[in-house]
Image (tube, rainbow, N blue to C red):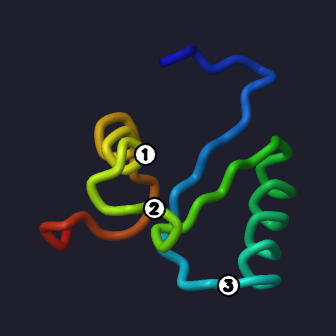
Amino acid sequence: MSTANERSDVDIYVDSGLKGLKFFGLLEDVATVLDVSVDLIDSSQVEADSRVLFEINATGVQIYGFTDDGK
């Protein structure tokens, strides 16, 4: 894992249910608000038990929503 710096992008994993232009609208809105490049991936794009999901669960920081235990 690399260290973030002023040129780093933001990787965001969401469970949005959005498709097509609505998904890309969310991507543009988030990038505009944060004023950085954003990689946005929806849970529907990630296979269960994949390396990507493992990495998200191991190193991701939840910033909004509920955990599996409902908190």
Q: Which residue is drawn at 52% across and 57% down?
A: 13
Horizontal and vertical percent position of residue 66: 30, 69
Q: Mark 3 points at which residue?
A: 19
Tell me which amino acid carries mark 2.
Answer: Val
**Left or right of 8 on screen, residue 37:** right
Q: Mark 2 points at which residue?
A: 46
Tell me which amino acid carries mark 1.
Answer: Val
Horizontal and vertical percent position of residue 36: 82, 41
Q: How many numbered discs?
A: 3
Contact between labelled residues 3 and 2, with CB atoms less than 8 Å apart: no
Q: Of callouts 2 and 1, which one flags the residue occurring earlier in the amino acid sequence?
A: 2
Give the vertical position of 20 relative to 61 (above or below). Answer: below
Where is residue 23, by image quadrant? bottom right
> Helix or strand or loop: what does disc 2 sit on?
loop
**Left or right of 5 on screen, residue 52:** left
Q: Gap in Å between the C-alphas at discs 3 and 1?
A: 20 Å
Which image quadrant: the C terminus? bottom left
Q: Which residue is drawn at 31% across and 43% down?
A: 54
**Left or right of 25 on screen, residue 10:** left
Q: Of callouts 2 and 3, which one flags the residue occurring earlier in the amino acid sequence?
A: 3
Where is residue 56, by image quadrant? top left
**Left or right of 7 on screen, residue 18:** left
Give the vertical position of 10 relative to 33 (above or below). Answer: above
Contact between labelled residues 1 and 2, with CB atoms less than 8 Å apart: yes
Q: Which residue is drawn at 66% across and 41% down?
A: 10
In front: label 2 or label 3: 2
Characterize the local packing of mark 1: few (<14), some (14-19) or many (20 or more) Cα atoms within 10 angstroms: few
Characterize the local packing of mark 3: few (<14), some (14-19) or many (20 or more) Cα atoms within 10 angstroms: few
Which disc number belongs to residue 38? none
Q: Mark 1 points at which residue?
A: 52
Tell me which amino acid carries mark 3.
Answer: Lys
